[in-house]
Amino acid sequence: MKRLVCMILSLALCLSLSVPALAVSVENRFPDKQTYRGFTDVLERDWFYSAVNTCYRVGLMNGTNAGFQPNKVLTAGEVAAIAARIHATVNDAVLPAPSTDPSLPWYQQSMDYLSGLGVSLPDGAKNATRLEFVQMLSAVLTDELLEPINTITALPDTSDAAVLRFYNAGILTGVDDYGTFSGGKTLPRAECAAMVSRIVRTAQRQSFTPADARSFQAAGMEPATVLFSLDGRTVTAREFLPLVMERIRFLEGQCKGGYMDFNWNNLHGDLTYREDVLQYAMDHLDVSERIGTAAYQNFDVQVFYSTLIDLRGGAPL
């Protein structure tokens, strides 16, 4: 009998070692810890209501002594506190108690906690940028928690691996249809809540395919680059470049129909192709070279065209 019991126990042990442990879902990693109490400055009709609700319930964002303050810009210290809470929650760790030293900021223990993990940290008192937010949170999030749902390999303004990781996980979608990251911009608490809620609740993550941004790459610009400015009115690359490409396509078609090579010295009316393309775009936007910014003055349509053709693998516009 004793021998039979030993055999059964041995078999049970072997089976337990051979069966992989079930993966813990993201939602189970971040269970609700408290009931949402609401904030007077967060209304149910607000676009960020659900995100704030989620972040509060899981204990990652608790508001301020003046409400939630959705438009208040986050400091790097506040981002560090969120990152530390995420790491502690996932790893069943206990954050150090806040310091009683009045000379230290309230978030110092979070900065120390992350520093001990080897996370690179900016000055906690400064306003955090979008890039600093991603870098701090990416440092404490494993691949298991950021499984990709998108396939994005390039953005108009960055190739940072941590940023692409957040885009591919559906945490970020950028500030425009092209997926522009704008990493140097600051981060309001409402936007932060939206990103954090997507981290802890996969149903809130965003599938996203950026619009074709190769024209901006070819021009060496971002969609928001200002090309013309006068009396508070601005014209950006987002408005200008599509018109440039539209006119080039028209001229390419004329060359094809006339069995002639596309050449920038060709004439359309009294203007060379180069002059015609720029004038066409400016006429449609009701601007002139006189109000062109340095970005416009440095724009070379011939270089733009050849670079864009290369990016398109040789295909015409």
Image: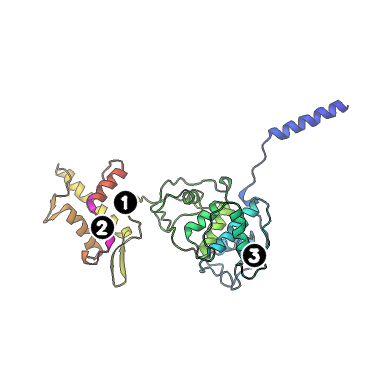
Q: Which residue is mark 1?
A: 215
Q: Mark 1: give few (<14), some (14-19) or many (20+) Cα within 10 Å.
A: many
Question: Does the magenta portion include 290?
Answer: no
**Residue carrying label 2:** 298
Say few, some or many: other residues with alpha carbon within 10 Å of mark 2 (under 14 / 14 to 19 / 20 or more). Answer: few
Give the magenta range. Answer: 291-302
In the image, 51 versus 288, the foreground residue is 288
Q: Are marks 3 and 2 in contact (CB under 8 Å)?
A: no
- The tag on residue 151 is none
Q: Earlier in the sequence, mark 2 or mark 1?
A: 1
Local crowd size for mark 3, using a 10 Å CA cut-off: few (<14), some (14–19), many (≥20):
some
Q: Element under label 1?
A: helix
Does the stretch in magenta take in 294? yes
First in residue order: circle 1 vs circle 3: 3
- Count of marks placed on residues: 3
Q: Nearer the viewer, residue 185 or 30?
A: 185
Distance of label 1 from label 3 (alpha carbons): 46 Å
Position in image of residue 64 (x %, y %): 60, 70
Q: Nearer the viewer, residue 142 or 118?
A: 118
Q: Position of residue 217 (x, y in %)?
A: 33, 51
Question: What is the three-letter code of the residue carrying label 3?
Answer: Tyr
| Residue at the extreme left of the image, as rendered | 270
In this rendering, position of residue 179 left or right of residue 293: right
The residue that disc 3 covers is 36
Q: Earlier in the sequence, mark 3 or mark 2?
A: 3
Q: Amino acid at mark 2?
A: Asn
| 6 to the left or right of 134 | right
